[in-house]
Image (tube, helix red, strand yellow):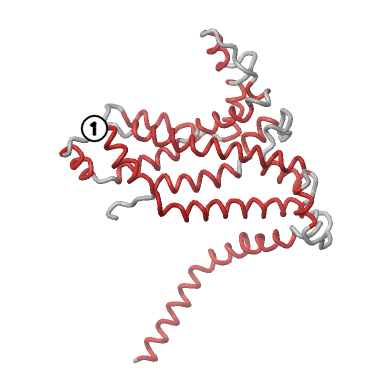
């Protein structure tokens, strides 16, 4: 009997691996092998056209003295520091507004979600027209109230805030996640708050926000990862140049330039691993600190 059960377990395991093999093979071929290869290439002068030679940490040392690298890194940090908190603040605020029991709310939810369906390139073209300093709609509306609008994308000072504004326009996906989190909060907590005479503000402060922290935590991690990989919008709007004065040159844009324009694939691989380490370190830090501020229902 024991031998029969053992054979059945082996057969079940074999069938399980057979069914899972397409995903396992795909994971190895498309993720594991490129990951290990990029780590090796980061220590070489590999350039796609030539195999290159092993140079140790020279690529990393050159990056530390590369002014464009530091400029792209500072631009990316600027975007992460401002966009991620603002996206969380506006995302939660919009979700709370869209969670109200108002007639026609499904229409409003659809309107706020629609920008996420617009392709990034089309969104870049649209906002380039809206923020045009000469005939753009935004500056036109500012002129009506007597304010002279800035050059926006043509200004070194306003280019990154303009990009943050565009990115905030497309936070509908995170708003949907916040809405799901709000609907998951038990009404028993609010009823208990009503019995205690709690105001709307106190219920939001003591019930809604604490119980929404798991969703905020998820969007925080995903937002940081996505912000560090900002590429499509600035690349489309500047034609890959990062103008003006490299103020729109982001980390992944410079990585792309090194890998596919200058064919310095070893150099680009080193940049990719530095980015990977930074994102992993920040993610680990957030996970470590989450115990202090993330609250789950029933705990």
Task: Reply above or below: 263 against 77.
Answer: below
Task: Reply above or below: 12 against 46.
Answer: below
Q: Position of residue 147 (x, y in %)?
A: 56, 11
Q: Position of residue 49 (x, y in %)?
A: 82, 54
* Residue at screen point 75% across, 54% down: 60
What residue occupies the far left of the structure in this picture? 195
Q: Residues within 10 Å of mark 1 (few under 14, many from 20)?
A: few
Q: Which residue is mark 1?
A: 199
Task: Reply above or below: 224 against 146.
Answer: below
Describe the element under mark 1 as helix, strand or loop: loop
* Residue at screen point 71% across, 42% down: 70
Give the image quarter of residue 91.
top left
* Residue at screen point 74% across, 29% down: 245
Q: Position of residue 171 (x, y in %)?
A: 47, 36
Q: Quadrant of the C terminus?
A: bottom left
> Is 208 situated left or right of 219 in this image?
left
Q: Position of residue 228 (x, y in %)?
A: 60, 44
Q: Nearer the viewer, residue 236 or 206?
A: 206
Q: Quadrant of the N terminus?
A: bottom left
Give the image quarter of residue 262.
top right
What residue occupies the far front of the structure in this picture? 292
> Is 43 situated left or right of 191 in this image?
right
Q: Nearer the viewer, residue 293 or 226?
A: 293
* Residue at screen point 73% across, 50% down: 268
């Amino acid at each position: 009997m024991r031998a029969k059960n053992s054979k059945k377990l082996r057969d079940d395991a074999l069938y399980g691996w057979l069914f899972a093999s397409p995903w396992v093979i795909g994971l190895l071929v498309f993720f594991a092998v490129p990951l290990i290869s990029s780590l090796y290439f980061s220590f070489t002068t590999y350039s796609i056209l030539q195999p290159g030679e092993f140079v140790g940490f020279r690529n990393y040392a050159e990056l530390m003295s590369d002014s464009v690298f530091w400029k792209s890194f500072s631009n990316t940090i600027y975007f992460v520091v401002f966009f991620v908190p603002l996206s969380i603040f506006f995302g939660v605020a919009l979700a709370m507004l869209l969670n109200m029991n108002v007639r026609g709310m499904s229409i409003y939810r659809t309107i706020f979600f629609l920008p996420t369906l617009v392709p990034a390139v089309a969104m870049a073209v649209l906002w380039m027209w809206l923020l045009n300093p000469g005939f753009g709609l935004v500056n036109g509306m500012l002129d009506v109230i007597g304010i002279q609008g800035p050059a926006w994308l043509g200004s070194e000072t306003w280019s990154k805030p303009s990009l943050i504004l565009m990115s905030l326009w497309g936070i509908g996906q995170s708003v949907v996640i916040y809405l799901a989190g709000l609907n998951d909060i038990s009404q028993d907590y609010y009823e208990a708050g009503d019995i205690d005479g709690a105001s709307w503000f106190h219920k939001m402060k003591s019930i809604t926000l604490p119980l929404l922290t798991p969703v905020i935590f998820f969007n925080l991690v995903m937002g940081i990862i996505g912000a560090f990989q900002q590429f499509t919008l600035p690349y489309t709007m500047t034609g890959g140049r990062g103008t003006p004065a490299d103020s729109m040159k982001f980390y992944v844009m410079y990585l792309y330039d090194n890998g596919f324009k200058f064919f310095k694939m070893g150099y680009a691989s080193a940049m990719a691993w530095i980015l990977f380490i930074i994102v992993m370190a920040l993610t680990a830090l957030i996970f470590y600190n989450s115990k202090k501020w993330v609250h789950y229902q029933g705990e």
